[in-house]
Amino acid sequence: MINYLEIGGQKRPAFFAFSTMSLFGDTIGKPLLTDLIKISQELKASEVKVMTWCMLKRGAEKAKEEFTATVSDVEDWLDETPGAMIEVMKVIGDSQIVSKKKEPEKPKRKR
């Protein structure tokens, strides 16, 4: 699902899913899935800018928009946009929530 982040002076599409994690792993040189799982649970502050860039790049691709920003541009946007970091983490957190189908309760037997 495409989310929109208010960052860098405009609303930008952001996407977080497996393809984003794959791009992130390739970008930081950690392409192993086991590394990515650990990184996503223990994301370093210095990696947030790269993850955000990956989310915005994949979001632009999904929305069929051009994306020419660099990681450095995204870092500046994070610095300049109050609350952007919270929104980024919210998009990541929301994408990891798995909805569980609740089993209907069985009728209780009378004794």
Image (cartoon, rainbow, N blue to C red):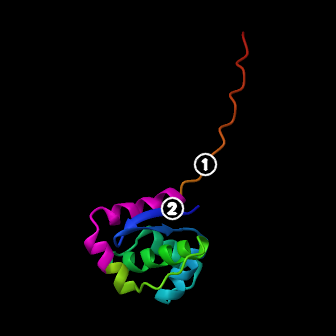
> Quarter-wise, where is residue 9 in the image?
bottom left
Tell how many labels: 2
Q: Residues within 10 Å of mark 2 (few under 14, many from 20)?
A: some
Q: Secondary structure at mark 1?
A: loop
Give the Cα distance between marks 2 and 1: 18 Å
| Residue 103 rendering spot, x and y as whole percentages | 69, 36
Which residue is drawn at the image coordinates 58% and 79% (left, top)?
Answer: 22
Which residue is drawn at the image coordinates 55% and 82% (left, top)?
Answer: 23
Q: Is residue 108 magenta?
A: no
Q: In the rendered image of this protein, does residue 15 appear above or below residue 24?
A: above
| Residue 104 rendering spot, x and y as whole percentages | 70, 31
Range shown magenta: 76-95
Q: Which residue is mark 2?
A: 3
Q: Which residue is mark 1?
A: 99
Q: In the rendered image of this protein, does residue 52 appear above or below residue 107?
A: below
Identified by mark 2, the residue type is Asn
Task: Locate the C terminus by quadrant.
Answer: top right
Q: In the rendered image of this protein, does residue 102 appear above or below residue 86?
A: above
- Please identify the dominant SS of the magenta region: helix
Side of 39 where 99 appears, left or right: right
Which residue is drawn at the image coordinates 73% and 16% (left, top)?
Answer: 109
Q: Secondary structure at mark 2?
A: strand
